[in-house]
Image (spheres, coloured by chain):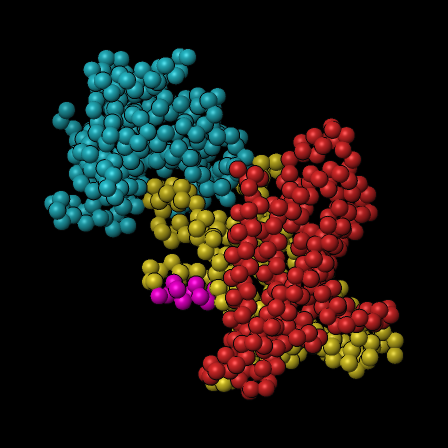
Chain colours: A yellow, B cyan, C red
Amino acid sequence: MNMLQTLWHYAPLLLSGAGVTLWTWLLGSVLGLAIGASVALLRRLPVRPLQWVLRIYIEIIRGTPFLLQLFLLYSGGPSIGIRLSALTAGVVCLGVHAGAYFAEVFRAGFEGLPKGQIEAASSFGMTSFQILYRISLPTMLVAIFPSIVSILISLSKETVILSIITVPNLMYQVQSMTVETYSAFSGIAALAVFYWVFVECVARFSALIEYRLTLFARRDSAEVRA
Amino acid sequence: MNKVPKIAIRDVCKRFGTLTVLDGVSLDVHQSEVVCLIGASGSGKSTLLRCINFLEAYDAGEIRIDGHLMGYVDAAQKQRRPMSDRMLRQARRDIGFVFQQFNLWPHMSVIQNVMEPLLRVRGLSAEVAVKRGEVALDRVGLTDKRNSYPLRLSGGQQQRVAIARALAMEPSLMLFDEPTSSLDPELVGEVLQVMKGLAAEGMTMVVVTHEMGFAAHVADRVAFLDRGRIIDVGPSQQVLHESKEARVQQFLQTYHDRTNF
Amino acid sequence: MQFGVIIDAFPYLLQASIATIGYTASGIVVGAALAIVVCAARFANSILFQRAALAYVSFCRGVPLLVMLMLIFYLLPLIGILVPASVSAVLALGLCTSGYLAEMLRGSLTAIPRGQAEAAQAFGMTGIDTWRRVLLPQAIRTCLPQVIGEFIALMKASSLISVIGISELTRVSMNIAADTYRPLEAYIGAGIFYLAINLCLAGLGTLAERHFSRGIIA
């Protein structure tokens, strides 16, 4: 069998693997963003023990490897009654992992809120809610956008690791294909190129969005359409 | 004068921790009057201005605008409570405030900046808000910059946009907190020119400033603050040239030494 | 939970930690060497070199470590190079980190005022000497804190070399989990060691930053 035939033969498996990869990435990202935003908000509450707990969560997650966290939940979980399928464990782990990183980014975002601009808004009598969604959120999102994207990119690369606990993602399918066909290298090489192109595309696309988002801060470019 | 003053400040005190910033300040500002607050930095003049629209809450005393107590529910001083947010917003929308750092919203174009409070606070339709915004921009001479983003403008232009943004709300009173202090010297004139125009049209203005020329020629009265108290107040010529207070003379002397080489 | 398992495993985990640090350090050394070459190519006059360096950096940053590891693990025998798995592991770690290190170095280099290189040339120093004596020493110092950050990240990522059988911290904790049937305790034990190494490195980073910033940051 030549390479093309091999690929054709395995196409359905590879496609389903790609689907699983994409799906885990999306779910993990959404879960991570939700956890990160909640943790960042909760950390602003003046409750000491809560702050400690959240701080410990962030430090532990950011201080240990993702693979270890995955093993801890998937293999260690059952001994304290947490039994999850590989897929669920993988998504939960991605979310909890990314959540700690997102939480730090959001915290920095809160700290960098434009005090004077908010004051100006309240001097006109704008409501807290109007100030939040017209002034604070837009400036904060613009400021943290690059960090968010870089976490999302890292997360897309972490999804590969789920194959180790038998989540049938692209990496897993490529490996099973290589085992059956004895042509290990070409499959992995194709996977490497796939990731390279994917990450490069996401990075370029986000750079484009970032450029649009920060047009207002560029002195050189043309005026906007009103 | 029998008429109720536009702003009536009575024995206002403000503390930050153990530091007393305002120590019993009283001042009346009448309709169409321009009052400049001058004094060394740290004398409390900016804090006083910020107390007038309650960006800073004063601890004791009263500030009344058109006879209405600002920031607190009218009650005996001991048991008064801060106003609800709703009442405070109501009270603030007729007071224009211009900041030293402009505080334009950088993610909105010039016209969007001017329209924003009209849309959100006055609840105007977009068409009406655009028209009003354009009128306000015309008054500060920046119609051609309507679609630019603030960060692309010079400091002087940004401050004029900030004034237009405040003007568009059709305030009955405008407060200026060192409006020219963060501008390059050659840009100060354009901003003062706009303010002078407003004064000529009869706007009631309270201006914290270091521009003695503006105080001398545009202000009706000048109040000199020192360590949280007004130690001299009166017609501008009188305070700036004939003050009997040693602190005032000393301050003006250093000011003249600096500007006249 | 039986914490006895962690205590019994302590000597093994300690030994494995040293292996983890060793692999990470080797990876950083390989990565740094590659990064200097790549960085030189990015500043080269030839468009071809610049493009190649750019593509290399984007490749290293785009390909996940696990994929890179497999790539090298399968590629080397294919082209007739037979080396122990540990060499493949170090190579993969080095390749992955070199892209990031190259970018850090580039950042530090571009932050050096142009005048310094001009001053060196005004004295008649050669291009290579200007690099070796003036630019690189400064750039390496200013990017050191970032490099320690990258060291910590690579240390965590190095848990993946366990899949090709390298006995570092994660692999050893897997073995302990299998032997004792107490996976939770085994992985918590490994986590404690990762956190401890992390803490030490972060402390080292602060020290290094203080030491090397003298004279550079006023």
Q: Is residue B70 left or right of residue A88?
A: left
* Residue C176 visible in the current orientation: yes
Q: Nearer the viewer, residue A59 or B11?
A: A59
Q: Nearer the viewer, residue B83 or C126?
A: C126
Which sits in the foreground, A65 or B60?
Answer: A65
* Relative image position of residue A143 (x, y in whole percent): 52, 49
**Residue bounds of the magenta highlight:** A49-58
Is-magenta flag for residue A51?
yes
Residue B54 position, x and y percent, is: 27, 41
The answer to whether one can see residue A161 in this image is no
Q: Vertical placement of A161 versus B170: above or below?
A: below
Number of marks in picture: 0
Residue at screen point 85% across, 77% down = A5
**As drawn, is A30 to the left or to the right of B246?**
right
Above or below, B27 relative to B240: below
User: Please, is residue C37 above or below residue C4 in the view?
Assistant: above
Residue B132 inside the magenta-drawn segment: no
* Between A78 and B158, the one nearer to me in the picture: A78
Residue that appears at 56% across and 50% down: C208
Q: Residue A128 at x, y = what percent?
A: 36, 51
- At 13% across and 44% down in the image, what residue appears? B77
Above/below status of C128 relative to C179: above
Query: Which secondary structure class fits the magenta region best?
Result: helix
In the rendering, at what x and y percent does residue C151 appear? Answer: 61, 59
Query: Quarter of the image holding residue B218?
Result: top left
Residue drawn at point x = 44 percent, y = 53 percent: A110
